[in-house]
Image: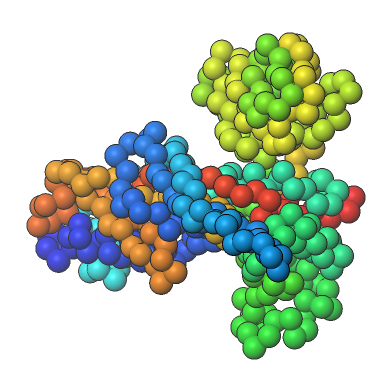
Amino acid sequence: MANSLLTTDLLLQVSGQMLEDQMVYGNNANMEHKTDFAAKVGDEIRYNIPIKSDGHLKSETGAIDQVTDITEVPITLKIEELAYDKVTLTDAELSWEIDTFAERFIKPRINAIVRQVDLYTKSVAGAFAANMIGDVGSNPTTHDHLLAAKEAHFINSLDDNPTVGIITPRAQTNLRKLNISNSTDYGTDKPMALRKSYLTEMENTTFFRSALAGTFDRGAIAGTPLTNGGAAAGATVLPIDGLSGDDDTRINIGARFILTGSDTTIYTVMERGTITSGAANLVVYPAIQANAADGVALTFQTAHIENYIYEKQTLALAVLPTADGPNVKGITITTPEGNKLGISILTTNVNDTTLSRTMQWQCYLGGKVFQHERGVCMQGAS
């Protein structure tokens, strides 16, 4: 017999709390957007970013006539993915009490969603590879490696704002082996930090390890990639062709390459490059340094290790429920930090007093690094 106390609304409340609790990358991003739901992949979400002002100096006889415009700078990120997990319930599962149902049924669904949210967020964070510190392809092993990363962040961002570091399990182990990592750098949380096996704070950075962090996946770079039609100096979009990947496969954010010839600049892909008929348009940083002719070969660089240190506010992320309807209902949670995130349940009829057998947990994802200079990718020494 079905448990009539198990309703879609109750499941959503439990699901939303679990989603907030379990994310690693997702909980270290800026989700302070105004949108409560998304209708489809391709929808655009707007953030307003305060402009930076350097101020002015006035001489003894000068006039105060320079006014700073306080208009915030709007940025747009696009909903790119739908994360979901679909299941069919048995008679036995429909009869469970909420505590059992939450532990044995909801939790595995949310774990699956969290994995997809964190994998997506990690892929967006690849933009910090534009600021590569250390020998690419190696994990940090010394305090010098961390100091070099923090120095680069300070020089690039011109301030010393607190940062978060999401690093590989190996990098975390290496840092914990250092004497400096086992001292009062843990502060008052030292015993808890040691038990949980993570670094709470070093060099004004709060560290988290993630099992999802590892060697960067450059994406569908196979083939003989060449410039397609060339590009003028100053361009930020580079058309390429000669790729052998299937349509709709991608060159990932954070892939790095050089152009054959006198231009030795290492360019970083800043947005996903989707392949169509062997061609793609790559949004790159820095801008193309010298005119590139048609047919210039691209050489993709060694894949880096995903150890990212960045200011949390610079990584914009949307985790949104779908719009409510007869077969779908969602919930949006606002965290104490002001972040919004949500999840939906798709079922036969969300207004039924008892649960339907087939249910799908889902949420839309969109993300963008809008100030890549406020983050770095920390490597070690080869």
| Residue drawn at point x = 81 percent, y = 72 percent | 177
Instruction: Give whichever of 269, 262 is nearer the camera.
Output: 262
| Residue drawn at point x = 41 percent, y = 46 percent | 46
> Is residue 210 at least partly visible in the picture?
no
Instruction: Give whichever of 57, 135 is nearer the camera.
Output: 57
Q: Of all residues shown, which one is farthest toward the bottom?
A: 188
Q: Of all residues shown, which one is farthest toward the front?
A: 61
Image spot of residue 104 (x, y percent): 35, 62
| Residue drawn at point x = 71 percent, y = 32 percent | 287
Instruction: Give whichever of 186, 369 is nearer the camera.
Output: 369
Asked if residue 66 lies left or right of residue 14, the reply is: right
Image spot of residue 131 (x, y percent): 74, 48
Asked if residue 138 lies left or right of residue 123, the reply is: right
Q: Is residue 192 above or below residue 248?
A: below
Q: Is residue 34 above or below residue 186?
A: above
Asked if residue 266 lies left or right of residue 381, the reply is: left
**How does the figure colour the protein chain or chains?**
rainbow
> Is residue 45 at least partly visible in the picture?
yes
Image spot of residue 26 (x, y percent): 50, 57
